[in-house]
Image: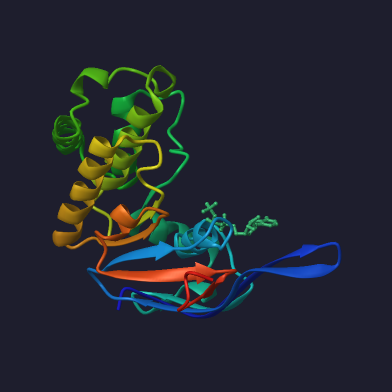
Amino acid sequence: MLLQLENIYKWVQQAGNRIYLLKHLNLEVAEGEFLSVMGPSGSGKSTLLNVIGLLDNFDEGAYYFQGQAVHEMRDKQRARLQKDHISFVFQAYHLIDELTVYENIETPLLYQKVPSPERKALVGDILDRFNIVGKKDLFPSQLSGGQQQLVGVARALISKPKLLLADEPTGNLNSRQSKEIMDLFRELNQDGTTILQATHSEFNASYGSRILHLLDGSWTDNPEL
Ligand SMILES: Nc1ncnc2c1ncn2[C@@H]1O[C@H](COP(=O)(O)OP(=O)(O)OP(=O)(O)O)[C@@H](O)[C@H]1O
């Protein structure tokens, strides 16, 4: 088992009322799965991905990653686990404005202390694979939205993460680019990366091996409701 959520609750306090963002949520994700989470806007998909990706805390419940109790970890341990094993592709690409395309893609390898010649080779390969060699010295502001998203995906894939969390990974891409990204995800998944994506797109979800539906922060068997 790669990860396990047990009875997770997350809430915010609003005008004296407790608003649940995640409620009584259980989840088991096996190594090598490709899981799609669907659900209407506001159902909690991004919140769930943020919790699983250790970007956000939860208020109650237990979270195990490769059998380790994440809810008992100190911040530093959690940060280490995240850097070593988890990558993100988000709607907002979170590229670093001051770094070039090349440098943005290289960042995860610096965190992982990959030696320089190997870094060069890996970044070169992925620039090639994504057809963006000609853009390598540009800054994010000099790219279109779709190109920025491609760079975000390249950066997420370069460190060969154990777990890839993707939140509407093809949101700003045309259908050809979307298919390219989803095909890359499939390849990556076949190479052993576990993928968890949140999506509104039936096309994207069809790439997954399992689909779960969220409604108001809980799983539902009746996605039409
Ligand atoms: N800090 C917060 N305070 C109050 N409400 C919040 C907070 N963060 C999230 N929410 C609410 O939690 C709900 C779930 O949001 P979330 O972004 O997880 O939904 P989503 O399913 O990813 O939606 P979308 O498909 O539109 O991206 C929303 O109703 C949102 O307004």
Quick check: 111 left or right of 215? left
Q: Is residue 21 visible?
A: yes
Please report the residue visible at 35 percent of the width from the left and 63 percent of the height from the top: 36
Please report the residue visible at 29 percent of the width from the left and 18 percent of the height from the top: 137
List x then y, in percent, for residue 40.
52, 59
Position of the N terminus, as image quadrant, is: bottom left
Q: Quadrant of ligand 1?
A: bottom right
List x then y, in percent, for residue 188.
19, 54
Between residue 192 and residue 34, name the one nearer to us. 34
List x then y, in percent, for residue 62.
52, 79
Quick check: 32 left or right of 39? left
Position of the C terminus, as image quadrant, is: bottom right
Q: Is residue 114 visible?
A: no
Please report the residue visible at 37 percent of the width from the left and 21 percent of the height from the top: 143
Q: How many marks do you count on the picture?
A: 0
Please report the residue visible at 46 percent of the width from the left and 64 percent of the height from the top: 52
Q: Residue furthest right?
A: 16
